[in-house]
Image (cartoon, rainbow, N blue to C red):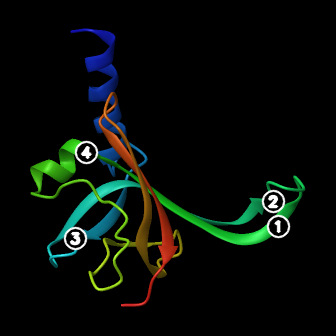
Amino acid sequence: MGLRELAQRHNRQITTNQTTGFAWPISITDPDGTTVEVSGFGDDISALIDPETGQAISGRLASIAVNINELADKGLGLPVEIHDKKIKPWVVEFDDINGNPHVFKVEKSNPDRALGMVTCLLEFYEK
């Protein structure tokens, strides 16, 4: 087994193991309404850097990182941004560390096919 395959295997173990890894339960719903529960990283932070001034500002930046194979194993493709407002977006839900639920839509999708992981930038969403 080469290093690339080993890195992908380790990535899946780390991103999907809620007991000994960093995984967190995440719910993803595709535009057709299919919802799956996966494990991955979810974050929602409020301290951002203004790219024009380099100063810290208050804002909201949420994202998830999930394993592509876990999505495929559960019958889901890669989450992507939906530009057409007539089509339902990909919806992501996860609780923060205090158990408060949050709902987002996928704003941008960045698959890393070498490691088998997709990172999605999220935007607040009301169902």
Q: Earlier in the sequence, mark 3 or mark 1?
A: 3
* Residue bearing the label numbered 1: 57
- In this orientation, which residue lies closer to the viewer: 82 or 96? 82
Report the Cα–Cα distance between label 2 and label 4. 31 Å
Q: Disc 1 on helix, strand or loop?
A: strand
Q: Is residue 81 left or right of residue 53?
A: left
- In this orientation, which residue lies closer to the viewer: 50 or 1? 50
Amino acid type, residue under disc 4 in the picture: Ile
Report the Cα–Cα distance between label 1 and label 2. 6 Å
* Residue bearing the label numbered 4: 68
Place of residue 121 in the rendered image (x, y in percent of width and height, measured from the top left): 49, 60
In the picture, which quadrant includes the N terminus?
A: top left
Report the Cα–Cα distance between label 3 and label 1. 32 Å
Q: Is residue 28 left or right of residue 76?
A: right
Report the Cα–Cα distance between label 1 and label 4. 33 Å
Q: Earlier in the sequence, mark 2 or mark 3?
A: 3
Q: Disc 3 on helix, strand or loop?
A: loop
Q: Residue at x 36, y 90 (%)?
A: 127
Mark 1–mark 2 CB contact (< 8 Å): yes
Crowd around label 2: few <14 · some 14–19 · many ≥20 (10 Å): few
Q: Earlier in the sequence, mark 2 or mark 4?
A: 2
